[in-house]
Image (spheres, rainbow, N blue to C red):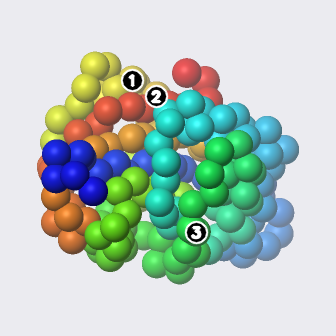
Amino acid sequence: MSVAEPRRIVLFRHAKADWPQVSDHERPLADRGRTDAPVAGSRLADTGIPFGLAVCSTAVRTRETWKLAVSELDHRPKTVYEDRVYNASPGELIAVLNETPDDVRDAILIGHNPGVHHLVEILAGTAEGDARERMNRRGFPTSAFAVLTFDGDWKDLEPGKATLVEYWAPSE
């Protein structure tokens, strides 16, 4: 990896979940979620980011979201299902991302709100174009994702160090 090339992290909220009589961790996707996840995957493919690693919450809805989204990508990255992403705070998510191997340039984290949205806000010291304005206006609905770039090693990722370069939500 060239020192001049920034790393990219995509923070992706799971698609719309259903509310059956199961534990929160076991909630499956709703019909709308099963429709939106592949659309988000297609939009992720449009970014052209060659993900080297996907870190996904172990919750049923995040696993289902990733299965539907990744099928739209040209390349299926190594996927790690991580218990610590479920119901994680931004600090806990940063700790997980700090463990990303140095040979990974581009990673995606599939998780939950409010942690994912707050993490974007905390990491993004700067933003390009109107990405922050659109995110602030829309919030971080299900199937939304943000693309951030930063320089340095994964272990150095910390608040304010990244740039928000893209934001997408299903109604965009």
Q: Residue at the location (22% across, 52% down)?
A: 2
Residues under labels 3 and 1: Cα distance? Answer: 29 Å
Badge 3 marks a residue whose secondary structure is strand
| Front of the two marks 3 and 2 | 3
Q: Residue at the location (31% across, 19% down)?
A: 130
Whether residues under marks 1 and 2 lie with C-beta atoms below 8 angstroms apart, the answer is yes
Residues under labels 3 and 2: Cα distance? Answer: 29 Å
The residue beneath circle 3 is: 79
Q: Amino acid at mark 2?
A: Arg
| Residue 122 seen in this snapshot | no
Horizontal and vertical percent position of residue 165: 32, 33
The residue beneath circle 1 is: 134
Horizontal and vertical percent position of residue 79: 58, 68
Q: Amino acid at mark 1?
A: Arg
- View extreme (front): residue: 2
The residue beneath circle 2 is: 138
